Image (cartoon, rainbow, N blue to C red):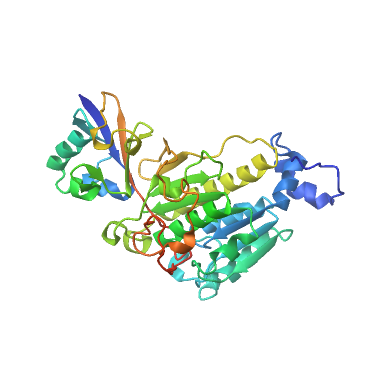
């Protein structure tokens, strides 16, 4: 099943500037592994360990933070929009 | 408490200056008086602090504090619209006070030309109702979040980098998250470029700083009984200047947050350097923080 990812802010460079990326996967973790094949280094930028996000990275399925769901095991369904952001501090 | 609009006589200029606010059903004379009585502290007279302070001053926020220890540089002027070319080399707070008093001489603008740190932040915040964060580094952002939570002060958060911006409001209501609920700790330096290194599309600071001013004004009006609609409490608004899109995401109070879910939390026990992580009941000595608005 296909879901759409968007990487906002400084993370957009991780997907080479693409505004939307479509990936077939059942969970967030599976999607990230698939995306890492296309954009080498992506998981290294987002993950602290194999199953944990860096604490300055948030992933939202539609509007919901996966950290408060099943983290990387959170399932995705067709039509979901997955937004990936990083903490930023510029002022 | 709704302030009565009929308790005092006001000069015709007052009605004239604030006529477009007074014309709004949600504000009116009483709401304008609430704005005139409010005290807001803006951290940083830079990219975010400039538009935020300009709109707060124009709106008639009665006391506006400005914290910044830096001087105006030529490369600030691409986005820091409080300052002009003639101000290069001057202290930012000095230039900012002049600009803001020029727009609205009826308000009090208080300069704080200091570097914010654990040692002075409590006193800095003491005289203000609301804090608007326009600082430029994670250490200050975590410090301000933690202290505002401890002091019970609403905090309007905004941050920018390159073409992107983030804005939200931490209202201090019991069900409201704090910054650490969203981002528990700062990224490692290699993942956290500053605007100096990564660049900033100047107008993004104007967009986010203006939204911060709107949030502060709504906090003031709502708390005075003038309902102008919900703030961004528990919503993080993401702006992407490349796609020209705004996207709100839901942010949630973390029941394990080491700050807002721990009644024993004390910012004086945290070292505000590097990751800014809170160790449970850390007894380490107070650390330093950088400040301001270099951006």
Name the residue at 32% across, 63% down: B197
Instruction: Give the number of callouts.
Output: 0
Tell me if B40 is positioned left or right of A18 in this view: right
Tell me if B142 is positioned left or right of B216 in this view: left
Q: Which residue lies furthest to the bottom in this view?
A: B89
Relative image position of residue A69 (x, y in whole percent): 32, 33
The C terminus of chain B - image quarter = bottom left
Relative image position of residue B266 (x, y in whole percent): 49, 58
Nearer to us in this view, A39 or B14: A39
Relative image position of residue B256 (x, y in whole percent): 40, 44
Q: Is residue A16 visible?
A: no
Nearer to us in this view, B79 or A48: A48
Nearer to us in this view, A48 or A46: A48
Nearer to us in this view, B8 or B186: B186
Q: Is residue A15 above or below residue A20?
A: below
Relative image position of residue B96 (x, y in whole percent): 59, 65
Q: Which residue lies furthest to the left in this view?
A: A37
The N terminus of chain B - image quarter = top right
Q: Can residue B180 be seen in this view?
A: yes
Tell me if B178 is positioned left or right of B214 in this view: left
Name the residue at 59% across, 56% down: B53
Q: Is residue B111 above or below residue B184?
A: below
């Amino acid at each position: 099943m296909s879901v759409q990812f968007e990487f906002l802010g400084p993370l957009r460079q991780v997907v080479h500037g693409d505004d939307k990326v479509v990936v077939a996967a059942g969970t967030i973790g599976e999607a990230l592994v698939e995306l890492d094949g296309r954009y080498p280094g992506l998981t290294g930028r987002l993950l602290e360990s194999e199953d944990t996000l860096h604490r300055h990275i948030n992933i939202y399925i539609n509007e919901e933070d996966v950290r408060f769901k099943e983290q990387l095991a959170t399932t995705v369904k067709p039509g979901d929009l997955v937004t990936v952001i990083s903490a930023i501090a510029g002022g | 408490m709704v302030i009565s609009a009929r308790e005092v006589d006001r000069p015709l200029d007052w009605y004239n200056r604030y006529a477009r606010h007074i014309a709004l059903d949600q504000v009116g004379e009483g709401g304008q008086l609430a704005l005139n009585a409010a005290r807001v502290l803006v951290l940083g007279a830079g990219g975010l602090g400039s538009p935020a302070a300009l709109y707060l001053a124009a709106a008639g926020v009665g006391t506006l504090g400005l914290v910044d220890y830096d001087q105006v540089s030529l490369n600030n002027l691409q986005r820091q619209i409080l300052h002009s070319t003639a101000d290069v080399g001057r202290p930012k707070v000095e230039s900012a006070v002049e600009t803001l008093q020029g727009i609205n001489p009826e308000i009090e603008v208080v300069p704080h030309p200091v570097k914010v740190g654990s040692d002075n932040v409590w006193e800095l915040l003491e005289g203000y109702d609301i804090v608007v964060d326009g600082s430029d580094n994670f250490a200050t952002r975590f410090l301000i979040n933690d202290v505002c939570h401890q002091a019970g002060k609403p905090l309007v958060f905004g941050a920018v980098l390159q073409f992107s911006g983030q804005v939200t409001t931490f209202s201090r209501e019991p069900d409201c998250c704090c910054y650490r609920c969203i981002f528990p700790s700062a990224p490692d330096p290699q993942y956290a470029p500053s605007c100096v290194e990564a660049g900033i599309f100047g107008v993004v600071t104007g967009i986010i700083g203006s939204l911060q001013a709107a949030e502060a004004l709504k906090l003031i009006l709502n708390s005075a009984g003038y309902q102008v609609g919900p703030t961004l409490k528990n919503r993080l608004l993401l702006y992407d200047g490349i796609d020209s899109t705004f996207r709100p995401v839901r942010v949630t109070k973390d029941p394990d947050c080491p700050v807002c879910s721990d009644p024993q939390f004390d910012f004086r026990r945290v070292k505000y350097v590097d990751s800014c992580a809170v160790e449970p009941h850390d007894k380490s000595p107070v650390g330093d923080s950088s400040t301001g608005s270099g951006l």
